[in-house]
Amino acid sequence: MLIVAASGRALAASARRGGFVPLVADFFGDQDTIAVAAAHVRLRDGLERGMRSDNILPALESLAARQEPAGIVYGTGFEDRPELISSIRRRWKLLGNPPEVVARAKDPLGLSKLCCGNGIAHPDISLSPPSGPHNWLRKRKGGAGGQHIRAAVNDGDARDGTFYYQRRVDGTPTSALFLAEENRALVLGFSAQWSSPASEQPFRYGGAVQPASLARAAIEAMTETVQKLAAGLSLVGLNSADFLVDERGIQFLEINPRPGATLDIFEPVDDSLFAMHIAACGNILPAKAPCFERARASAIVYAERDIAAFPMLDWPHWAADRPAIGSRIARGDPLCTVFACATGAAEARALAERRIAMILSLTIVGLP
């Protein structure tokens, strides 16, 4: 199975557990991605330039030349590039949302209209800079991971169509991971998310923990919203929906129409989310969501300084996405991912944050 994503490790590992042979193209070429993939091609300059047809299509052709793939699954990185998904679909069987669905899901005005028509609470949207920007955020169309979000007050006057504006609302960032097929959806679980702010990226994605602490009313409202969105957009496979939740209720923010950042913390002990994704693309949903005995958290570790050549480290078992020895990492780039399990969500998150500090200490010790 071909896999292409900004980071392909989680998809590839889940594919292996599901009995598939992963052929992976991604931005990083981390040690554990190389270990789990049957073949791998690194997409150069991906963090700086994003997904591009001039490097993705040759990379996929190279991978497909070694083994005949049954299809292709894409992850993060294509939200603003449906035309690239179209190019991929012309060559290989696409197992995921088609480009027209991705375009609808990431069209802020169209999504707002869909919400209005289905009674879904959703922050106000504007395509032009608001006159009173202090209570608004500026977001890049098709953006992912929070790096693209800024306060509109710092916006200047962007009118080139790249950005849109969303009114600020209060609440805890919460995500619903779900499988969809045709007009049905099955919610697999809810995670609470947090940011890891940087000076120029105040909403940069930090991590997630499941289960989220939610009232029954919020769970029911988010589940109903997911069902309406899945049917209204004709979603298939693994997707996630982002919300803000407080005591007054829920506000739906956006759809991520592909497998995303919370795969690791929702991977079943005796099953494979990748296999579930493939089955859902064939209109087969499991009878029920998997159960988890313990809380799980994952968090991104970002480099605090430039690293010219990443050193050899004695990695702990709870760290993944381990950079290749000798690779260059710029300050603020993702360095690795850490995981934590505990009896409760608060304990799991706290353990993940302690492990971030431990990784940063290890890299400082290992650097010349």
Image: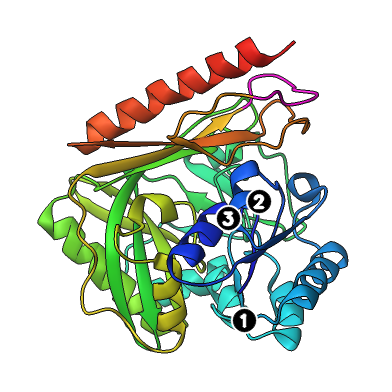
Queried whether the magenta region covers residue 57, the answer comes back as no
Q: Is residue 105 left or right of residue 317?
A: right
Residue 36 is tagged as: 3
Q: Nearer the viewer, residue 181 or 285?
A: 285
Q: Secondary structure at mark 2?
A: helix
Q: How dense is the environment of label 1, judged by Cα within 10 Å: few (below 14), some, or many (20 and up)?
A: some
Q: Residue at x 80, y 51 (%)?
A: 49
Q: Looking at the image, is 149 positioned above or below residue 200? A: below
Residue 34: give its label: 2
Q: Secondary structure at mark 1?
A: loop
Going by the numbered disc 1, the residue's amino acid type is Gly
Residue at 58% across, 42% down: 321
Q: Which mark is residue 60?
A: none
Circles 2, 3 touching at the beta carbon (< 8 Å)? yes
In the picture, residue 288 is in which quadrant? bottom left
Q: Which mark is residue 71?
A: 1
Q: Amino acid at mark 2?
A: Ile
Q: Quadrant of residue 309?
A: top right
Magenta segment: 303-312
Mark 2 to mark 1: distance in Å? 20 Å
Per the image, label 3 sits on a secondary structure element best described as: helix
Q: Residues within 10 Å of mark 3 (few under 14, many from 20)?
A: many
**Lower position in the chain sequence, tag 2 or tag 1:** 2
Asked whether residue 235 is in view, the answer is: no
Q: How many marks?
A: 3
* Residue found at x 24% / y 48%: 211
Residue 314 spot, x, y in % from top left: 56, 24
Q: Is residue 157 above or below residue 79?
A: above
Where does the image place residue 197, in percent across and percent down from the top left?
53, 29
Helix, strand or loop for the magenta stretch, by majority: loop
Amino acid at pointer 3: Val
Give me the C-alpha separation between circle 2 and circle 3: 6 Å
